[in-house]
Image: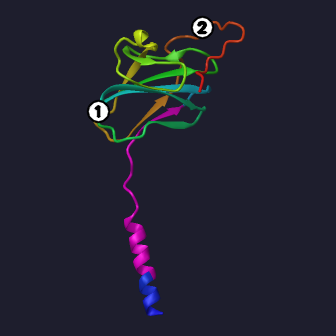
Amino acid sequence: MLRNMALAAGALVTAGAMVSPAHAELKLCNNTESRIGAAVGYKDENGWASEGWWTVAPGKCAVLYNKDLIARYYYVYAIDYDKGGHWSGESYMCARDKVFTIRGIEDCEGRGYTRKGFWEVDTGDEKNWTISLSGATTEPPKPAAAGDNAAPAQ
């Protein structure tokens, strides 16, 4: 009986030691009334990359970069799926309409991608960062033609 209790106590200690440390990430929270699509750009040990799309419902959050933040600056582009328009900036990276991971930021069109203006996010060298998206788009919605669907194909 005493031996069984010792084994059980040892198992609890071992289980506690196997708990992994917290994982850092870049997260985007959608504080708008629309569904949005988000893309992220970053520079890592392999150079520049851009990835998308995450669909984020109103009032929800999505992890855009699920690794330790090794750079100070990250770049985000977002589309308002419900009302049209997008949130953009002056840092140009490659994207496409379907889910993507693209290496490099040069000659987007020549490589079959579109060139999008991402906005810069200064994480201040933090290891964990949350972006809160709210307010109107930086580019107003364009009139949609009959049958248009603003959401990128998945």
> Residue 99 vs residue 21: left or right?
right
Please tell me which residue lies in front, 43 or 108.
108
Instruction: State left or right for residue 3 relative to residue 122.
Output: right
Q: Which mark is residue 71?
A: 1
Name the residue beneath numbered marker 2.
Answer: 142
Residue depicted at x 39% and y 52% = 22
Residue flagged by tag 2: what amino acid is it? Lys
Q: From the viewer's perspective, is residue 151 above or below residue 130?
A: above
Q: Between marks 2 and 1, how big is the CA–CA gap? A: 35 Å
Q: Which residues are magenta?
A: 8-30
Q: From the top left corner, tell me how far across and down residue 36 is, in percent.
A: 57, 26
Q: Residue furthest front?
A: 111
Q: Please name the residue shown 37% across and 13% down the image.
A: 90
Against 83, residue 7 (above or below) is below
Badge 2 crowding class, 10 Å Cα cut-off, few under 14, some 14 to 19, many 20 or more, is few
In the figure, is residue 128 to the left or right of 32?
A: left
Q: Mark 1, residues whose alpha carbon is within 10 Å: few (<14), some, or many (≥20)?
A: some
The kind of secondary structure element at disc 2 is loop
| Residue 115 rendering spot, x and y as whole percentages | 43, 12
Q: Is residue 24 magenta?
A: yes
Of the two numbered discs 2 and 1 on the same chain, state the one appearing first in sequence: 1
Q: Amino acid at mark 1?
A: Ala
Question: Is 137 in front, or is 17?
Answer: 17
Which residue lies at the image location 59% right of the left edge and 11% below the top edge?
141
